[in-house]
Amino acid sequence: MKKLLKRWLTDTSSHEYFIVSDVLALVTVVSIVSIVLETVPSLADYGNIFSVIEWAAVFVFSLEYIGRIIITKPTIKYIFSFYGLIDLISIAPTFLGLGNFTFLKSARAIRLIRLLRMVRLAKMKRLKSHEPDEKMSFFAINISLFLLVMLSSVLAVGILIYLVEGSNPAFKSVPHGMLWSFKMFLLGLPITYPGTVGGQVVHILGRLVGLVVFGVLVGVSGNVIKDYLFKSNNK
């Protein structure tokens, strides 16, 4: 069983690994969309559906977490590693959230880091293979990486402003907070300024995150241009 789990979860040379990764990526996206939509007041009637989606996602992630504990020796190495803690945070709030801890439920959005890890692994595989028929080109991988960083940043800042400014009609749901953070990242667009100290702190933090996202865009653009020039010189 350990050999099978290693092949599914850690062996990037196996076909099964990428199937499992795709499934986890799909479950991650669906669960995050559910978490975001359940904060929309007009969708309150669909609470049971959101709950089913969440518990199904947690079931899948719990199986993955247990599997990684089984195959990692020493076990504590995985449990207290960065991704081990991320995986734990991805499932723990659902169980703790039985007490209706809204802030813990919102923290589940950190699951997006899973997607960033998968894109990084796909990029490494691409660089090692150098196969012309690779499904995802170097360009597509870099663009996907930037989009994931952008989406993660918008989501994180959107959730934070929703948590601290939820009573403000301009931030009454996570989607409203995400729209606000997206406008803020695109400098020059008018935004609603928070009315609380916590909201102002998030505003400043969001500005800094926007600069980081811009830096990632510059880095991705540089990688794409470098790869294009490298191929041109080889021809």
Image: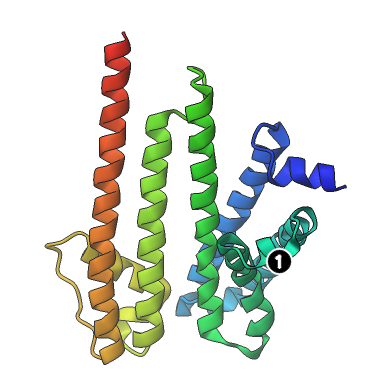
Is 24 above or below relative to 31?
above
Determine the residue positioned at 50% across, 36% down: 124
Is 203 above or below relative to 27?
below
Q: Nearer the viewer, residue 85 or 207?
A: 85
Indicate the position of residue 96 as horizontal and vertical percent values: 66, 83
Q: Is residue 85 visible?
A: yes
Determine the residue positioned at 33% across, 80% down: 171
Q: Nearer the viewer, residue 162 or 96?
A: 96
Specify the quadrant of the image occupied by residue 166.
bottom left
Determine the residue positioned at 22% across, 69% down: 207
Residue indicated by mark 1:
76
Image position of 103 (left or right of 167): right
Which secondary structure lies at badge 1?
Answer: helix
Q: Nearer the viewer, residue 74 or 60?
A: 74
Indicate the position of residue 196 as horizontal and vertical percent values: 26, 91
Image position of 184 (left or right of 42): left
Q: Is residue 57 visible?
A: no
Specify the quadrant of the image occupied by residue 101.
bottom right
Q: Residue furthest front?
A: 74
Q: Residue furthest left?
A: 188
Q: Quadrant of the C terminus?
A: top left
Amino acid tagged 1: Ile
Image position of 101 (left or right of 53): left
Determine the residue positioned at 20% across, 78% down: 192
How many discs mark residues in the rendered view? 1
Indicate the position of residue 119 as horizontal and vertical percent values: 50, 44
Indicate the position of residue 151 as horizontal and vertical percent values: 39, 57
